[in-house]
């Protein structure tokens, strides 16, 4: 299961919404900017959901990185 799929299940949202938020975060956009000015790209998720998503994304990425380190 990919990180996007995991987040879709946890937040009960469509994959395009999760992908849009991940892309915006990776581009360096801040959460207030995403919440206020990019609503059309993520389906108007509120700032609390975006903050929780960001935290969970970091956790899942760190976990995946750690798994790769352990495999090596």
Image (tube, rainbow, N blue to C red):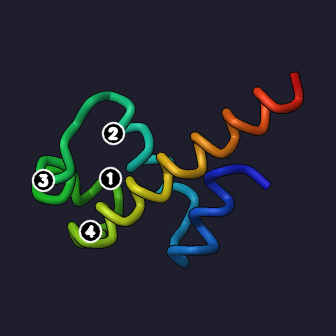
Find the distance from the CA under tag 3 to the CA under tag 4: 12 Å
Q: Residue at x 19, y 42 (%)?
A: 30
Find the distance from the CA under tag 4 to the CA under tag 1: 8 Å
Q: Earlier in the sequence, mark 1 or mark 2?
A: 2
In this image, 26 relative to 66: left or right? Answer: left
Circle 2 packing at 10 Å, graded few (<14), some (14-19), many (20+), is some
Q: Which residue is mark 2?
A: 24
The quadrant where residue 10 appears: bottom right
Establish if 36 lies above or below 58.
below
Circle 1 packing at 10 Å, graded few (<14), some (14-19), many (20+), is some
- Viewer-proximal residue among 70 and 64: 70
Q: Residue at x 62, y 53 (%)?
A: 4
**Helix or strand or loop: what does disc 3 sit on?**
helix
Q: Which residue is mark 3?
A: 32
Q: Which residue is mark 4?
A: 44
Q: Position of residue 47 (x, y in %)?
A: 21, 67
Find the distance from the CA under tag 1 to the CA under tag 2: 9 Å
Q: Which residue is mark 1?
A: 41
- Viewer-proximal residue among 31 and 38: 31
Establish if 62 lies above or below 55.
above
Find the distance from the CA under tag 2 to the CA under tag 4: 14 Å
């Amino acid at each position: 299961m990919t990180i996007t799929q995991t987040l879709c299940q946890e937040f009960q949202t469509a994959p395009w919404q999760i992908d849009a938020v991940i892309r915006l975060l990776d581009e360096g956009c801040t959460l207030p900017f995403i919440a206020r000015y990019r609503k059309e790209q993520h389906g108007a998720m509120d700032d609390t959901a975006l903050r929780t998503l960001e935290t969970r994304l970091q956790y899942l990425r760190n976990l995946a990185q750690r798994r790769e380190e352990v495999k090596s």
